């Protein structure tokens, strides 16, 4: 093997008062990274371009030399979740979230407090898959608060999501939900947006009254009563091939990206979130991911030129403002 590309997602940060004005990386104990830094070369890059704040999919798609026009997060995550897609199937990334009501539209938490267990997500998904729509669809929970949603048919992906915080290349906190909207004048785009909005409205009525969420409220937890969707895609991403690459992956996005690029994907089952402490699950997942990646490299290093390893756990505390 000639090289290993390790992406430590979300590791870059700003000085923090809680850390004595150090960044989390400056404050951390990093002997192995220090070893590499003192014996190698360092540099900086913009994953996309100056002033563009990328999401995870946009960053990795660009780092591997691809045009963002030819890839969507929904398609990558759905493929990474093992859902078979045909051209025209509309795939979207989903968060279980918490809002106050459809009338007031206030987002309370974009991840339902990060306390939604795997079992709870699976039970809620089972109820959502019974929604009656004029088309077939699949709702699949993935890891913690994450899920993917696929509408079967000849849909347009030229529609917005329903969370205005996620606007390509920009960072802004908008704590109001919105309807999905067409981004052109085509009838199919309007129809596609209408179908998504119909599903989301019906999903709220089911989720808000579901026994799982009633029990969560009783325990003082945020209900997972709303679905935030983004990254609509109805075409298979067109990405450069990386045939002689190994990808030890465990999150749907990275699995889907690696498979579309033609990498050899080896994976494991991410630990289920069984308690209310998502960070306990995070550390368990990080340890398992590191150990699995090391074993995969030892076993396969003679058969591949390069390896791509993506560590996701470092990104989550940044989203939660927990240095």
Image (cartoon, rainbow, N blue to C red):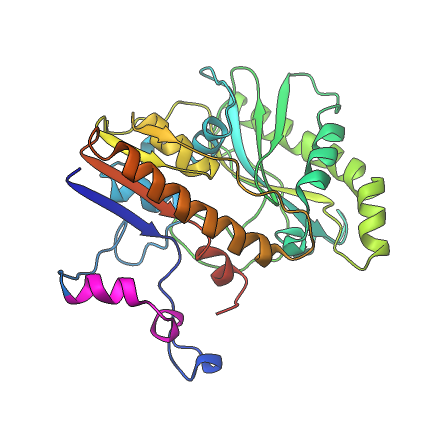
- Which residue is located at x 41 percent, y 33 percent? 255
Residue in front for this viewpoint, 242 or 269: 269
Q: Is 299 part of what is drawn in magenta?
A: no
| Residue 106 as seen in the image, left or right of residue 23 | right
Q: Position of residue 72 (x, y in %)?
A: 41, 34
Q: Is 30 part of what is drawn in magenta?
A: yes
Do we see residue 260 in this rendering?
yes
- Quadrant containing the N terminus is top left
| 114 vs 20: above or below | above
| Residue 227 as seen in the image, left or right of residue 45 | right
Which stretch is magenta? 24-38
Residue in front for this viewpoint, 3 or 89: 3
Indicate the quadrant where residue 119 lies.
top right
Q: Position of residue 100 (x, y in %)?
A: 76, 54
Q: Position of residue 270 (x, y in %)?
A: 53, 40
- Which residue is located at x 50 percent, y 61 percent? 317
Q: Position of residue 160 (x, y in %)?
A: 52, 38
| 267 vs 288: above or below | above
Do we see residue 109 in this rendering?
no
| 167 vs 277: above or below | above
């Amino acid at each position: 093997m000639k090289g290993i590309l390790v992406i430590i997602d979300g590791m870059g940060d700003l000085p923090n008062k809680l850390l004595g004005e150090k960044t989390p990386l400056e404050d951390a104990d990093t002997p192995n990274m220090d070893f590499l830094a003192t014996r190698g070369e360092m540099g900086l890059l913009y994953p996309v371009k100056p002033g563009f704040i990328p999401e995870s999919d946009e960053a990795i798609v660009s780092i591997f030399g691809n045009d963002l026009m030819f890839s969507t997060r929904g398609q990558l995550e759905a493929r990474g979740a093992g859902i078979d897609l045909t051209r025209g199937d509309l795939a979207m990334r989903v968060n279980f979230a918490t809002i106050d009501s459809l009338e007031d539209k206030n987002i309370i938490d974009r991840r339902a407090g990060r306390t939604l267990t795997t079992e709870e997500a699976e039970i809620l998904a089972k109820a959502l898959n019974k929604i009656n729509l004029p088309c077939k669809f699949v709702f699949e929970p993935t890891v913690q608060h994450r899920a993917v949603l696929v509408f079967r048919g000849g849909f347009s992906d030229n529609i917005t999501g329903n969370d205005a915080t996620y606007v390509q290349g920009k960072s802004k906190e908008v704590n109001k939900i919105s309807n999905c909207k067409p981004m052109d004048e085509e009838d199919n785009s309007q129809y596609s947006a209408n179908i998504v909005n119909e599903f989301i409205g019906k999903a709220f009525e089911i989720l808000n009254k579901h026994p799982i969420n009633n029990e969560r409220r009783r325990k003082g937890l945020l209900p997972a009563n709303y679905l935030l969707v983004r990254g609509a895609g109805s075409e298979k991403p067109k990405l450069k091939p990386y045939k002689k690459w190994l990808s030890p992956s465990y999150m749907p996005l990275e699995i889907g990206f690696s498979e579309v690029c033609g990498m050899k994907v080896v994976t494991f089952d991410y630990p289920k979130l069984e308690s209310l402490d998502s960070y306990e699950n995070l550390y368990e997942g990080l340890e398992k991911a590191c150990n699995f990646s090391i074993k995969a490299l030892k076993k396969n290093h003679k058969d591949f030129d390069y390896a791509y390893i993506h560590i996701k756990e470092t990104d989550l505390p940044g989203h939660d403002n927990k240095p």
